[in-house]
Image: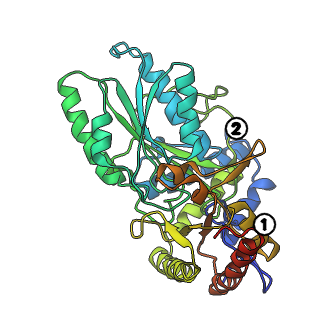
Amino acid sequence: MKGRKLSVASAYLDNAATTSIDSEVLRAMLPYFKEKFGNPSSVHSWGQAARQSVDESRQTIANFLGAGASEIIFTGCSTESISLAHKGLVEAVSSQQNFKSKIPHIITCRIEHKAVLETCRHLEKRNLAEVTYLPVDRFGLVAIADLEKAVKANTVLVSIMYVNNEVGTVEPIGEIGKLIKKLNDLRMAHDEPKIYFHTDATQAIQYLDCRVDKLRVDFLSLTGHKIHAPKGIGALYIREKTPLVCQQDGGGQEGGLRGGTENVAFIVGLAKAIDLVTRNKDKNIKRIKDLQQKLIRGVLKIPGVNLTGHPEKRTPHIASFTIKGVEGEAVLLLLDSEGIAASSGSACTSGSLKPSHVLLAMGIPPEVAHGSLRLSLCKETTDREVNYALSILPKVIARLRKMAPRF
């Protein structure tokens, strides 16, 4: 098994937070730190060599998404891609002469990543957009009927994530795309503004079909560090003729939509990681799914533990739970002391422990949501890591319950 080397008593099960860089990705990147260091905007041979590598990388990602190379721009991460899609579209639509409403309307859902939620709140606070936050069911699924009901005459953007990063639930993106196309066909007949569709595919790239025409999306955001590329590189798919205003002015790079010298080494690394996703994909997914099911079966043997997210409509790399009688942060600390990396939906902010907004939106009570645990896998995860985690977790939970018996 290639990849990171672990001691006997360790397990990295936080791959939904970040993955290690694949050795092939690293090898592809290394020449661009020294030998091929040219600025892709320069006319000399060093610059043109760099430009060729950027262009080839863009084409690799476009091919993966079933898009045109001109529809791909490079960003720093998914968060930046999301911000550009939302803010750039709102600014562009607001300035169009045929947009008759006071402000544009955005539809999203309550379990989106903070990158979407905070961007929407930013637009709301500045009275640049009004936003509807759709509810989800107990599995974290958005209802198509709720979305259709929320559409208004001034709706210009629907933003629904492909996979929830905390519980792994897969949203019905293809069905939403079909609905939006139907609505847009009707709106064209009445000279109403088009509804554009964005999906955050950060957790979906390695596991699901991300061809943009099949999904019928106008924007798709992704990042490198979830797919064994480095942190600090992402991409945004923008369907041709979609209106968008640049949010980072500068030298006119990335088709005038993102100023700043391109991060060539990281762009090459992202393209290599995307290329590797297509290799042995079915085999990797099956192995990861088998490990996930083993993990789920083992964790659910512990009393007072429940699986969160949809039992079937979920990606193979995320297993998430609520554990009665413990705090998620305490579980993480004790697991870490045993060499196990995991994560929790709770986050310590300003001295107060806040339960996951995702779990609360799914109807899980705050006192239960405080005991959340996410274990996430990748192509490098081993059977030994899963076995080790399953041998340690019951002891950690028993210890915490004994220290503060509420179970």
Which amino acid type corresponds to the residue marked 1 in the rendered image? Answer: Leu
Which amino acid type corresponds to the residue marked 2 in the rendered image? Answer: Thr
Q: Earlier in the sequence, mark 2 or mark 1?
A: 2
* Pointer 1 local density, CA inside 10 Å: few below 14, some 14–19, many at least 20: some
| Tally of numbered discs | 2
Q: In what element is the residue under mark 2?
A: loop
Q: Which residue is mark 1?
A: 333
Image quadrant where one finds the N terminus: bottom right
The image position of residue 22, as x and y in percent, is 67, 69
Residue 255, can we see it? no
Residue at point 77% right, 49% down? Answer: 37
Image quadrant where one finds the C terminus: bottom right
The image position of residue 59, as x and y in percent, is 50, 52
Q: Are marks 2 and 1 in contact (CB under 8 Å)?
A: no
334 vs 235, nearest the viewer: 334
- Colouring: rainbow
Q: Which mark is residue 22?
A: none
* Res. 395 image quadrant: bottom right
Can you say whether 226 is above or below 160 in the image? below
Q: Residue furthest front?
A: 406
The image position of residue 158, as x and y in percent, is 39, 38
* Res. 17 image quadrant: bottom right
Residue 164, can we see it? yes
For residue 294, side relative to residue 15 (left or right): left
Residue at point 50% right, 62% down? Answer: 168
Instruction: Give the Cα distance between marks 2 and 1.
Output: 40 Å
For residue 179, side relative to residue 249 (left or right): left
Q: Which residue is mark 2?
A: 261
The image position of residue 85, as x and y in percent, is 50, 35
Q: Nearer the viewer, mark 2 or mark 1?
A: 1
